[in-house]
Amino acid sequence: DQQVKQNSPSLSVQEGRISILNCDYTNSMFDYFLWYKKYPAEGPTFLISISSIKDKNEDGRFTVFLNKSAKHLSLHIVPSQPGDSAVYFCAANYGGSQGNLIFGKGTKLSVKP
Amino acid sequence: EAQVTQNPRYLITVTGKKLTVTCSQNMNHEYMSWYRQDPGLGLRQIYYSMNVEVTDKGDVPEGYKVSRKEKRNFPLILESPSPNQTSLYFCASSLTGQGGYEQFFGPGTRLTVL
C-alpha cells in the first residue's frame, strides 16, 4: 500500500507561471516531509522540507504547504523557469522509521519557454 | 567537496555473474541506504544501514546483499543477478536520529542484466 502518493505523473507549465506539485500521504505518524528534484543522469537532490508542526516553509522561489487534516502537501514554484524542468519526488519520514524516507513515484515537470 | 560516489556508473552484465556496486561518502554520515528506481515505481529502498555493522532490509531486498564494515562505504552485492534487477541504482547517506535529515544521493549506477 502506497503511503506517499503523487497522483500526477507529469505537469506542464509556461515559463514565468506558477507550478504546483501535489502529494498525498496516508500515514498520520509522518512528522517530516521533503521534496527532491531529479535531473536525468543525476541523483536526486534535496530541495525543501517541512516539519509537521508547520504549515508552510519558503525558500526563494519554492514554497511547501502542508495540510495535516487533509494529509496533503504541495510544492509551489514561482516563477517557474525552464531549468526547473525535472522529476520531483515527495518523501516523508517519522521518528520511528530511523531516518528512512518513503518516496512517492514522482512528477515530471516541464517548463516551456 | 561533500559527496556520495558510486562505481561503476554503467554496467552491463549477464545473468548469474556476481557483481558489486560500490558506494562511498565523505560526510561522516551514520546512515546509508540503497534505492532502485524503475519507471512508474519511483524510488524503492533495497537495504539501509544505521551505522557500522548495522544493516536492515528495505522494501525490496530480495536478490541483494550489503555490508557495512567501514562508516564511509556501503557496497551493494548481487550474488546472482537476474534480468529483473535491471534498474537504476542510487546510494544515499545522511545523519541519523529523530527528524527528517535530508539524504544526499550519489549519481546513480545504471545496471543492465542480460
Image (cartoon, coloured by chain):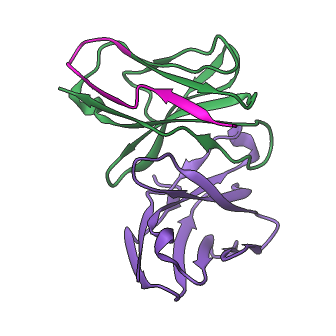
Chain colours: A purple, B green
Q: Position of residue A25 (x, y in %)?
A: 57, 63
The image shows a total of numbered marks equal to 0
Residue found at the very far front of the displayed protein? B1
Q: Residue at x 45, y 56 (%)?
A: A39
Q: Position of residue B46 (x, y in %)?
A: 48, 32
**Along the line of sight, which residue is nearer the eye, B49 or A37?**
A37
A58 lies above or below B65: below
Q: Is residue A8 left or right of residue B23?
A: left
The answer to which quarter of the image holds residue B13 is: top left
Q: Is residue A101 left or right of residue B40?
A: right
Q: Position of residue B35 (x, y in %)?
A: 48, 37
Q: Is residue A57 left or right of residue A38?
A: right
Magenta region includes residue B6: yes
B29 lies above or below A112: above
Q: Position of residue A60 (x, y in %)?
A: 72, 74
A2 lies above or below A18: above
- Which quadrant does the C terminus of chain A fall into? bottom left
Q: Residue at x 70, y 16 (%)?
A: B52
B68 lies above or below A24: above
- In this picture, which residue range is highlighted in magenta? B1-19
Residue found at the very far left of the displayed protein? B114
Magenta region includes residue B68: no
Q: Residue at x 69, y 73 (%)?
A: A66
**Along the line of sight, which residue is nearer the eye, B48 or A16?**
A16
Q: Residue at x 47, y 66 (%)?
A: A6
